[in-house]
């Protein structure tokens, strides 16, 4: 009988280094495949797994124990990082991530990223100490130095609702913000509105830019000008929307409808309309964005663009935890889930005369 070759399936001497060399990848990549980490390209994973099976690779007892310990079935931590974890949007992210983590007894750590650099350095130190399995970043800004520090930790990272200047090599999750802006504005146009205002989110956010672009596209497609006085920038919070709405209602030719870039701002429009003696939707139609739970509870219930926020958060968490064959995100680029317009009672055809304009 011929002697077994160095990579014979029955040869227990096959090492991770052998597999890495024959697959044309690094030892770290083979280790990720063995540990079922999600941050490996599907074709690379298939090639490595094929070689492992062909060579009859057998984990050593020490490696088996290490691999078991690294798997999420025994728990672990996932970090969710926000600028404002108290917002309705963040609350939905936390719920979605926590539900996914509970399936493997993992836990969620919620961090509000300190605006002071000293606080951010403490967060990075804490992150290194607690052995997180990965990070979901939903922050408006992070310096190149901080991004580099996170990468040096060697942790999987997923960006949610991409904002600011981030490395394009990081996987990102988001929703169809442009399409949502088009759908919201088109709905108001279909009802007969021609003076449609928008209160945007901060324009440093890519999501805000995309929603505004969708608003502009819908107006232009309808042959309507984009009136600069009808575009007001908000900060995604109630107070800024109240102030913006007061300005809009004070125009000589005020809008008959407002598209707010999130639900919290839409409720700010409600409040100012009520303070001006106006009714929603009889005098002023309002559309929001997000479809957080409160949008169904207000009176009248809010027409809004539904983002699959919990689904996005769950997908990000499952990817970091390596759950399921189909849950890994691509190593780079953006995965986008669609938005859906949910029509409720806050929109109607425009009044016979614009709000605030007295009868002749």
Image (cartoon, rainbow, N blue to C red):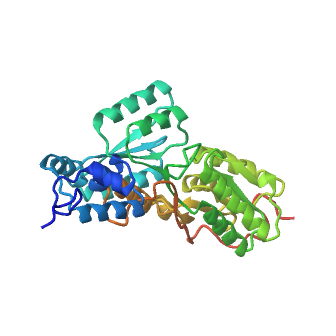
Mark yes or no: residue 48 visible: yes
Locate the N terminus by quadrant. Answer: bottom left
**Rendering coords of residue 195 (x, y %):** 78, 63
Image quarter for residue 342? bottom right
- Direction front: furthest residue: 2
Compared across the picture, whether 53 is left or right of 25 comes to left
**Rendering coords of residue 220 (x, y %):** 79, 66
**Rendering coords of residue 249 (x, y %):** 74, 53
Nearest the viewer among 239 and 200 is: 200
* Count of number-bearing discs: 0
Nearest the viewer among 12 and 27 is: 12
Compared across the picture, whether 33 is left or right of 288 comes to left
The image shows residue 236, relative to residue 145, as above or below, that is below
Nearest the viewer among 350 and 164 is: 164
Residue at the (39%, 32%) spot, across then down? 123
**Rendering coords of residue 321 (x, y %):** 32, 54
Compared across the picture, whether 156 is left or right of 172 comes to left
Locate the C terminus by quadrant. Answer: bottom right
Residue at the (42%, 53%) spot, across then down? 93
Mark yes or no: residue 272 visible: no
Nearest the viewer among 293 and 154 is: 154
- Direction top: furthest residue: 118
Residue at the (50%, 43%) spot, across then down? 139
């Amino acid at each position: 009988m011929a002697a077994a070759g160095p990579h014979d399936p029955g040869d227990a001497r096959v090492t991770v280094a052998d597999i890495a060399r024959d697959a044309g990848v690094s030892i770290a990549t083979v280790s990720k495949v063995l540990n079922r980490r999600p941050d490996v390209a599907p074709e690379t994973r298939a090639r490595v797994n094929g070689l492992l099976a062909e060579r009859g690779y057998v984990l050593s007892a020490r490696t088996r124990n290490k691999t078991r310990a690294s798997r999420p079935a025994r728990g672990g931590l996932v970090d969710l990082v926000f600028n404002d974890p108290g917002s309705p949007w963040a609350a939905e992210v936390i719920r979605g991530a926590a539900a996914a983590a509970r399936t493997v007894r993992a836990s969620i750590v919620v961090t509000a990223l300190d605006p002071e650099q000293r606080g951010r350095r403490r967060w990075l130190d804490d992150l290194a100490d607690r052995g997180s399995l990965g990070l979901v970043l939903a922050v408006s800004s992070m310096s190149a130095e901080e991004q580099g520090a996170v990468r040096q930790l060697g942790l999987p990272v997923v960006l949610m609702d991409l904002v600011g200047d981030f490395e394009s090599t990081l996987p990102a999750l988001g929703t169809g913000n442009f399409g949502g802006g088009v759908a919201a504005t088109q709905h108001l146009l279909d009802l007969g509105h021609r003076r449609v205002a928008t209160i945007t989110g901060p324009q440093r956010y890519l999501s805000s830019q995309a929603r505004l672009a969708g608003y502009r596209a819908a107006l232009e497609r309808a042959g309507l000008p984009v009136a600069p006085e009808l575009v007001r920038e908000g900060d995604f919070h109630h107070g800024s929307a109240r102030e913006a709405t007061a300005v809009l209602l004070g125009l000589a030719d005020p809008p008959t409808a407002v598209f707010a870039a999130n639900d919290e701002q839409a409720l700010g429009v409600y409040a100012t309309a009520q303070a001006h003696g106006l009714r929603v939707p009889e005098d002023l139609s309002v559309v929001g964005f997000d479809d957080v739970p409160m949008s169904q509870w207000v009176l009248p219930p809010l027409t809004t663009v539904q983002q699959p926020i919990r689904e996005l958060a769950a997908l990000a968490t499952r990817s970091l935890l390596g759950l399921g064959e189909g849950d890994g995100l691509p190593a780079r680029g953006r995965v986008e889930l669609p938005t859906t317009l949910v029509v409720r009672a806050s929109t109607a055809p425009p009044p016979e005369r614009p709000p605030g304009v007295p009868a002749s």
